[in-house]
Amino acid sequence: MVKITDVARHAGVSPSTVSYALSGKRPISEETRRRVHEAIHELGYRPHAGARALASSRSNVLALVIPLRAGIHIPVVMQFAVSVVTTARRYDHDVLLLTQEEGEEGLRRVADTALVDALILMDVQLHDPRLPLLRTLERPSVMIGFPASSEGLTCIDLDFKAAGERCVEHLAGLGHRVVALVGSPPEVYVRQTAFAQRVVQGFTAAADRNGLSSTVHPCEATPGSARAVAERLLREQPALTGVVVHNEPLLEPLIDAFEQLGLRVPGDLSVTAICPDELAESVRVPVTSVALPSAEIGTRAVELLIRKLGGGSTVPEKTLLPPRLTARASTGPRAAP
Amino acid sequence: MVKITDVARHAGVSPSTVSYALSGKRPISEETRRRVHEAIHELGYRPHAGARALASSRSNVLALVIPLRAGIHIPVVMQFAVSVVTTARRYDHDVLLLTQEEGEEGLRRVADTALVDALILMDVQLHDPRLPLLRTLERPSVMIGFPASSEGLTCIDLDFKAAGERCVEHLAGLGHRVVALVGSPPEVYVRQTAFAQRVVQGFTAAADRNGLSSTVHPCEATPGSARAVAERLLREQPALTGVVVHNEPLLEPLIDAFEQLGLRVPGDLSVTAICPDELAESVRVPVTSVALPSAEIGTRAVELLIRKLGGGSTVPEKTLLPPRLTARASTGPRAAP
DNA sequence: TTCGCCCGTCGAAGCGCTTCGACGTCTGGC
DNA sequence: GCCAGACGTCGAAGCGCTTCGACGGGCGAA
């Protein structure tokens, strides 16, 4: 293994000079810098990560905790993870993958052993048991999603409340008067996952504000339940003409179910969703949707963390990404009664 | 930060004794071990990962390289990653996540900086450009999938050739004489991804062996192309009664397409697939399938790596998991002509 | 011209851990 | 009863890097 002393000797300087030439933490003459880099290149030198971490108390590794529970859409998690890794690399960091399963002990382990410099958590619940731990940990963290109290923590997410509102307002603007929200599986609400509840809040608030009649239906993510909920909606709200879907796997089956029940989309029924653009576009009838910008959230989360690690500047505790609605083929004006 | 000398002092022993009590690399008396563990617990001691890595030249971290290219089924990748992380933890290792995008440079970086002890690669191609690199790297690796020549490397995967055969034989056993394979998207073959080709080989070989008439159809993973390929199959092979699907996202749409074209599954057409059990069971008509055991492959891959790291025992270069076919509702005997 | 200061570089002191050799103390086999 | 060897522990020497204080030379200000 080639080490920093080898490089130093080869370049005719001291090891500390090599270190400074690499980190830029002290001024080094152009000439010396060049020789050092030449030596590095010729010898194929790579600094030893462990030694570096020990001496600098920075591992340049971020922890990413991914959820693996029921009711979360896997591709979203994956896209998110990829965006975190990609962004981390731009800032010269790597990403350690942890599963939610390891729980608080896992967080404490990677933080306390200095394996990682900072943490990113997904799938935050309203009263997440990890919250107190994160506050005591001496390493910065960013959470995707908002707990009930984010005091002293850093959170980022799509503004799901505004997203729910945005969908309703889009429908209201098209003249729809009776709307329904087909939501995430019941267990997601039971766990009090913040984002699901906020969609409901926004949906309901906007419906009330606009004088619409509205209902909310948590729903399993199976094709069978798509059919069931479609039938139920038509039975209970015969005048229904607008639907908001916040349940990725259900989107396509639900539209199928409505059409099989004789409703044309968007002729008889306008459908809008909160989901990744990619999904909204791949449905048979492209769906008007508020984008779930997982890649952007991932990028922003990493950037927040890097700034926190950089010290100096403080970062905002809350970052809410404004919803962006794209009108597609699945929504249209309410047919004349 | 509490360090090993603190623990040593608190337990009334020397730091080396603490180290040995923890690693078990030298005999320590029961009494001393107890005192050491008490001290560790009372002080909340956690060994510093960097220091440990530096002194022992073992980071206890594995690299996992995930693909993010088109044509691979995301949930499979995710399930795989989760199983790798979970298994790694059982052997006291963590997992660093890399994207294929970083390429060979990424592998070299994490290996040469001693950030990781070993590597797991997914989505291996027949003539994968990373092969020569892996051979020169001084760290062990395991590949998911088989390149053209695996000389000197360690590979593991489902035996896709046997899986293709198994599907055909199941159909042949039910009396079917004309079969078709609906495969992965064309780009997967163009890239010469090993597993896709092996399915074709097995499928064709078994069909020939059994005297069946057969065709192969690479296919995009979009609902539209499901319809298209279904129509084409019926047009070109009117006597078709057996289909093997090796394309996860297409499975459900394809069955839908066949039924919309007036074919009952399994009445008129028997369908079998190579896909995760979970998917096969969630389709409207549960599909007879050869399981894609991503979780098991992940587990086995980690275990191979751990054994390689342990030195001593050598591991097999090739591990082929035998296919396991589960008969479900989508296949039945060929109707009397 | 001289003083002070910045620039560029060096040497040495760790960072917290593992591991090697050494050493005293038992034990058991002959 | 003695020696070989195992057992249990210790001290010290690094692992490869960063960082701190120091220092000589050059420059501008006085």
Image (cartoon, coloured by chain):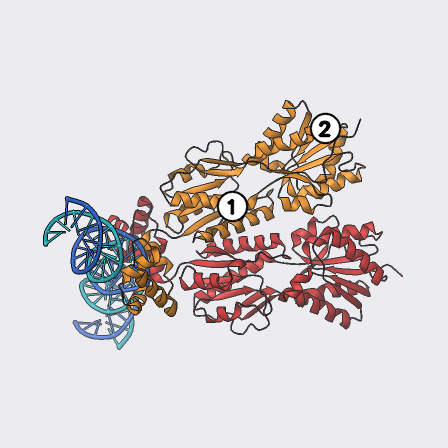
Chain colours: A orange, B red, C cyan, D blue
Q: Looking at the picture, how far across and down is residue A72, in whole percent?
A: 59, 43
Q: Which residue shows up at 72% across the image and 54% down it?
A: B251
Whether tag 1 and tag 2 are in contact, CB under 8 A, the answer is no
Coordinates of residue A325 in the picture (x, y in percent): 63, 37
A151 relative to A75, above or below: above
Q: Residue furthest right?
A: B337
Place of residue B166 in the rendered image (x, y in percent of width and height, measured from the top left):
71, 65
Mark 2: few, some, or many residues within 10 Å (few <14, many ≥20)? many
Task: Name the residue located 68 percent from the left edge and 27 percent from the top edge.
Answer: A214
- The alpha-carbon separation of the residues under discs 1 and 2 comes to 35 Å
User: Where residue B242 sits in the image (x, y, percent)?
Assistant: 79, 61
Which of the pair A225/B248 is nearer the observer?
B248
Q: Amino acid at mark 1?
A: Gly
Q: Foreground residue, A34 or A162?
A: A34
Residue B264 in the figure: left or right of residue B307: right
Q: What chain letter is assigned to the residue under label 2?
A: A
Q: Quadrant of the N terminus of chain A?
A: bottom left
Residue underneath mark 1: A298
Report if residue A187 is visible in the image: yes
Quadrant housing the C terminus of chain A: top right
Q: Amino acid at mark 2?
A: His
Q: Quadrant of residue B15?
A: bottom left
Q: Are marks 1 and 2 on the same chain?
A: yes
Q: Considering only vertical position in the picture, is B68 above or below A238?
A: below
Residue B126, compared with residue B69, is above or below; it is below
Compare residues B81 and C1 and report the one nearer the observer. C1
Name the mark on residue A176: 2
Question: Tag on residue B115?
Answer: none
- Secondary structure under tag 2 reads loop
Q: Counting residues from the N terminus, which is met first, the one under dot 1 or under dot 2?
A: 2
